[in-house]
Image (spheres, helix red, strand yellow):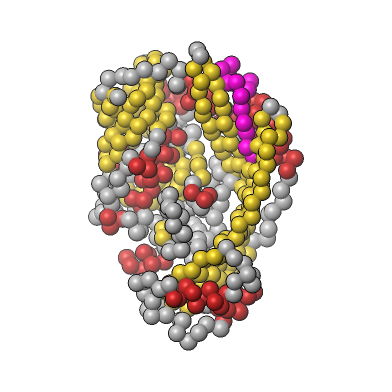
Amino acid sequence: MINLESCRIALKELPPHIKNAEFNIEKNTSYLVKVTGKEVAGNSYSDITEVFVRASGEKTGFAYTQDLNENPKDLITKAYNNSLDIEFSNLNILNKEGRYEVLPENTVNLQEMVNYARLLEEKLLKSHKSIESVVVESRTDINRSSILNSYGLDKRYERKVSYLSAHIVAKYQDKVYNLSNAMSGRQYRDIDMEDIIDQVINQLESQFNARSYKSGVYSCLLDKSVMVNIMMTAWQLFSGIKYSDSALTGRLNSTIGSAAFTLIDSPAHHKTGYHYRFDCEGTEAGENILVENGYLKGLMHNILTAHSVGHKPTGNAGRYALLSGTIPTDIIVVPKILYIKPGKKDRRDLLKQLKDGIYITESYDVFHSINISSGNFSIPCRGSLIRNGKKAENITEMTISGNLIDLFKNIKEVGNDIYIEEFLKKSYCIGSPSVIVTNLNVNAG
């Protein structure tokens, strides 16, 4: 039976050929309520515990299970027998003894979830006459993370995240439009519903009467959601694993962006309910300024990548990088909450500063449209033509293209409207405000 005490015992009784071992136990509980027409249209509950094991001797191997009836000692043996060509043991780089515990914050109020969902639905239906129906999902997630190893490391913490997502159907001039937006907070009262509504209306109105436009090189305002989509893939440039085979290779400690571009990886941020105490190796999670005013200061590291370059680990060990159909047992590098530092100007000020150009409001298929090795991108999108700082007409069937390093260098201004989005299996978050970028290729059709 897998529990913390049985794992502790197994780690003290390792076979002679296994020098060290580690358990990472992730318990994820999720409550979801769906509301439409002020009524509860559905609800669900899930409770999944994932156990990851690393065992080292002459080589290192990994094991994974969701079967809590397995024997921890057998799992350690299974992990070692799955050995990869990775020698952790000779490096002696597992985290040493340390203890950390945060008491549970696992209260869930289902009626509160319903009430906030109803309130957001009501506000959205009143926000724009074209909106015909709204489905709101309120979700409460509780994650308990535990890390134990044979050196005496024994840490655990629990976090609760409240989440509201809205799915809207609107009709304008006999055309139907579908869109959605979402936001999280530690408590439902922390979620800014007005921000959700503003983003919904902005994206909705940007689709009305859209037409194609001529190709060219423009100054563009990239909406915060567009920049988040770009950084959902582009963050790999700043990974200690990807760095040596990316567009940033050899650029550490040099300028790779404009003075307006600062990139931070942080364990917490007030615009999201997600927060991280330590990574899946037990390294404490701290703030890491990767790029400061355009200057590349550092990278994200797990223990192994940090050791390989003589740096300290940055608390970025994880297993879920991008979409994958395989069980992620190996330890890689992932962000915590990676975001572009916001500025002071709101969207209206940014549009005035842009004066004439294109406001890119939505983008698509960024995972297949960005090449990390070269930095080149070609991203389908839509938006609005801007004249004298105001929307003139909506345009669609566009593609923005270029190179990520050039994009970073051409960031002229950064807004204050930061948006942070959860990603794969809620294991990390990416955030950005809206940004003005000069000299951006926009291709029609």
x and y percentages locating residue 106 in the rendered image? 69, 53
Left or right, residue 49 beside residue 58: right
Name the residue furthest bottom.
Answer: 16
Is 55 situated above or below 193?
below
Residue depicted at x 56% and y 83%? 13
Front residue of 284/104: it is 104
* Count of number-bearing discs: 0
The image quadrant of residue 154 is bottom right
Residue depicted at x 48% and y 26%? 203
- Whether 212 is among the magenta residues is no
Left or right, residue 251 beside residue 362: left
The image quadrant of residue 83 is bottom left
x and y percentages locating residue 28 in the rendered image? 60, 55
Residue depicted at x 58% and y 32%? 166
Is 95 situated above or below 427?
below
Which image quarter holds the C terminus?
A: top left
Is 411 situated above or below 97?
above
Question: Can the viewer see residue 358?
Answer: yes
Left or right, residue 263 beside residue 52: left
x and y percentages locating residue 355 in the rendered image? 35, 20
Front residue of 247/174: it is 174
Residue depicted at x 54% and y 70%? 23
Front residue of 7/154: it is 7
Which image quarter holds the N terminus?
A: bottom right
Question: Can the viewer see residue 293?
Answer: no
x and y percentages locating residue 372 in the rendered image? 30, 48
Is 27 situated above or below 211?
below
Q: Which residues are magenta?
A: 125-138
